[in-house]
Amino acid sequence: MNTEGFEKLHKLSFSTPSLFVTLAILSFTVTLMHILNLGVLNFLAFSIILLLLKPVLRIKFNLNRYLFFLTFISISTLLTNAISRYLNVNPSGIFVAFVTTTVLYYMAEAEIIEVLVASFVASFVFYPNPATIVGVFFGIIFINFMNKNINGYNLRLCFKSFLLSWLTNDPSYFESFLKRHAKSFKGWIKCLRIGNVKLVTTSFHPGPMRNIGGARLVERINSLKDTVFLHSPTDHSLNPASAEDVDKLISSIVCDGIEIKPMKPFDLESENYVLTVFPFDKVRLMFVSGKNCLDDLPYELNVDRAIVVDAHNAYCTSFKPNVEELKELVKKGMEFKSEFCNVKYAFKKFRVETRSICGSVAVLLLDYGFERYAIVVIDGNNVKLEFRREVEEFCAKRGFKAIVASTDNHSKTGISTKFTYLPVGSDERDRVIFDILEKCFKLNFEDCNVSFSKRDVVIDVVGEDFCKFINEAEKMSVSIAKLYFALLATSFALSIIL
């Protein structure tokens, strides 16, 4: 599922400068309007009406966005009036009405009729010219253009609920939209317990974005004591639809299962992937790493008597898995013979947050006597390949074979208009991982018992139709932006000549 289309639109619509910069520009433009006698009292009345409309329409702008909107309107007013004076004509409020209509509709809980009336009243007070209503009609054209049903989902309502969640940091707007079309799915939660450490994986995907639905899954699991989330082969169609579904998953975690005995680990390779297997007598823990590229792996790679982990550790802009190659590799990993051995463990989890690390770094060290392993699980959305290799080399020099995995955490997707998400290794502060590893290599190893449990669970997921809808919506994002700019340009021109 591609969420970049919605992110492009909210980035386009709601990127704002700092409050200080906004205030400085607004003060300057309002002063100019007063000096040039360009209806500064009308502008102030327009500003006050917007404030009064905030509780009526349940508008979700904060102070910075409110002032930025007024700054945008004041600048447009200076431009239209300057050109109108040059042409010796009287300007109208078509541009102001169009912008106000579209911004209020997508930033408010109110229905469209309420917004249209409020927008016309506010714009008419600013520009008491009958032509102002043309701007409201332009707003209707744009809103109606987005009123398309794709795969049973309404694009206008989806975008509105997404923006309201993004503006307020309240996931319930978008989750309510998702729940209307959610599909029930029977999945599972698996837990491998090594000593006190609980490695938890699930058939569900930790998305779609920010704090919405399953995007909180990783944080919830990692917040449990000595517990680490591992990303299984799954996809965005299996994103939990709401916070309630995540709660149900968390309450289904059980780690007191059957006792299993450790066996000697081994590696298998194919053309594009490396499979690191930690076998036990009744189940196998298998990490799939990409040699050059790795992202979401197909659900069908999950097999009985195994915990298959999509290590999500080779970031690339486009990834298409070779399913047959992966199936054959996993099959070999299940069939490869190994022998019983002893294992000791050491573990520590650290609270870490950077632009690319979402909350934690967990290090599980395993000592098999003949070889030592460092399973490094970084709470982030994929890992830059060069950074992963640097971690692997760092560990190798200290006598440990490293398996680097990320959680595919989507909590930073859509959280900022500056970027969607960054793979681990993109932020210089990510290098704290090397200090963490140095501390972990000094830990004392302990004997351990190992157990495995699996529990089925049924929750609501977003489903494949929603993913198809998002992909189609992403394709339309450029057309939507083009139409909006075309209507902006047209309304600006008509504000001068009508």
Image (tube, rainbow, N blue to C red):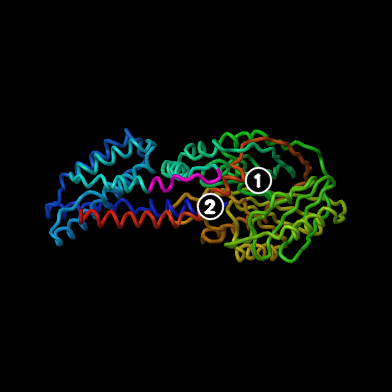
Residue placed under numbered mark 1 in the picture: 228
In this image, 52 relative to 291: left or right?
Answer: left
For numbered disc 2, what is the local secondary structure? helix
Q: Residues within 10 Å of mark 1 (few under 14, many from 20)?
A: many
For numbered disc 1, what is the local secondary structure? strand
In this image, 401 relative to 383: left or right?
Answer: right
The answer to whether marks 2 and 1 mark residues whose Cβ atoms lie closer than 8 Å is no
Disc 1 residue type (three-letter)? Val
Say above or below: 66 vs 333: above
Which residues lie in the magenta part?
Answer: 142-151
Q: Position of residue 344 (x, y in %)?
A: 77, 50
Q: Can residue 205 be seen from the camera position used here?
A: yes
Q: Can residue 43 be seen from the camera position used here?
A: no
Disc 2 residue type (three-letter)? Glu
- Residue sitting nearer the eye, 310 or 124: 124
Residue placed under numbered mark 2 in the picture: 472
Q: Residues within 10 Å of mark 2 (few under 14, many from 20)?
A: some
| Whole-number angstrom distance, CA of label 2 to CA of label 1 | 35 Å
Q: Position of residue 385 (x, y in %)?
A: 62, 64
